[in-house]
Image (cartoon, helix red, strand yellow):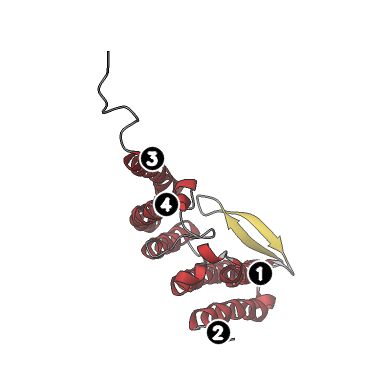
Amino acid sequence: MRISRANMLSLGLVIVSFALAFVLYDRLPESIPTHWNAEGVVDGHVPKPWGPFVVPLVMAAVYGILVAVPRISPRDFSVARFLGVFEGIQTVLVAFLFLLNALVLLVGMGVPVPMARVVPMFTGLLLVVLGNYMGKFTKNFFCGIRTPWTLASDEVWLRTHRLGGRLFVLAGVVVFVSGLLGGGSAPLLTAVTLAAVTPVVYSYVLYRRLEGGKRGPKDGAGSHRVV
C-alpha cells in the first residue's frame, strides 16, 4: 500500500519526537513539566521514565487514530472524499504536537520559554490553518461541525462550514495576537467559544429556514372560507 507524503511526514515527526526524548533523556530532570497554568507557571509534572515521552506517546496515538479514520468511515460519509485535506489536517495536528514536545523538552532542560505567550501563538496559527481547511470538508462523522442539522442537509453542511472556517480564522488571529501581547487566557477562551458555538446555532437556524421554505404555506393558508 502506497504511503502518502503527508503520512510519511507525520510518521517522521512522531519518530523524531521519540528520538529527541531518548537523546535528551539524561539531560532532563527526574520530573518533567507537562502542564502550565494561564500565567505560564508550571503546575503539573510527570516523573521519569514516562515524563519525556508523554507528548510523543500522544502524538503516536493521534497519528494512529487519524490514519485509521479513512478506513473505518461509512461509505456515504467517507473521509476519503476529501482525503488530501484530511491528511493535511493530520500533518498540521501532529506538527503542532511536535512543537509542543520541543517546548516541553526545552523547559525541562532549563530554557526559560515564555509558555503563556508561545503556546497561544501556536494555537492561534493552528486555528487559522484549520479554518482554511474547514470549507473543504464533505459530510462525515469524524471532523467538522457535526450537528443533527448539518448531517441532515448538504446545503446546511456547506454553508455552516464556510461560516465556521471564517470564524476559526478570525479566532486564530485573535488568539495569536493575544499570545504575542501577553493577553492571558480570557481572549483565547472567548474567541474559541464564539467560533465553536456560533456555527452550531447557525446550522439550526439555517436548517429550520430552509425546511420551512420547502414546506411552503400551511394547508389552507391560501384557501377561501366558505360560510
Does label 1 or label 4 sit earlier along the sequence? 1
Q: Nearer the viewer, mark 2 or mark 1?
A: 2
Residue on which the image places disc 2: 3
Q: Which mark is residue 121?
A: none
Q: Which residue is mark 3?
A: 208
**Marks 1/4: CA–CA distance:** 38 Å
Residue that mark 4 sits on? 153
Q: Which of the 4 image quadrants contains residue 17?
A: bottom right
Sequence order check, earlier mark of 2 and 4: 2
The N terminus lies in quadrant = bottom right
Instruction: Give the image location of residue 153, x and y in percent.
Output: 42, 52
Image x and y of residue 136, in percent: 39, 65
Cα distance, mark 3 to mark 1?
Answer: 44 Å
Q: Please state which amino acid type lies under the numbered disc 2.
A: Ile
**Mark 1 is on which residue type?**
Leu
Q: Name the residue tied to disc 1.
A: 57
Q: Of callouts 3 and 1, which one flags the residue occurring earlier in the amino acid sequence?
A: 1
Q: Quadrant of residue 25?
A: bottom right
Q: Distance from label 2 to label 1 (Cα)? A: 21 Å
Query: Mark 2 to mark 4: distance in Å?
Result: 33 Å
Q: Residues within 10 Å of mark 1 (few under 14, many from 20)?
A: some
Q: Are marks 2 and 1 in contact (CB under 8 Å)?
A: no
Circles 1 and 4 in contact, beta carbons < 8 Å: no
Identify the residue at horizontal 25%, vertical 22% (top origin): 224
Q: Between residues 154 and 16, which one lies in front from this camera angle?
A: 154
What residue occupies the far front of the structure in this picture?
227
Left or right, 93 with reference to 157: right
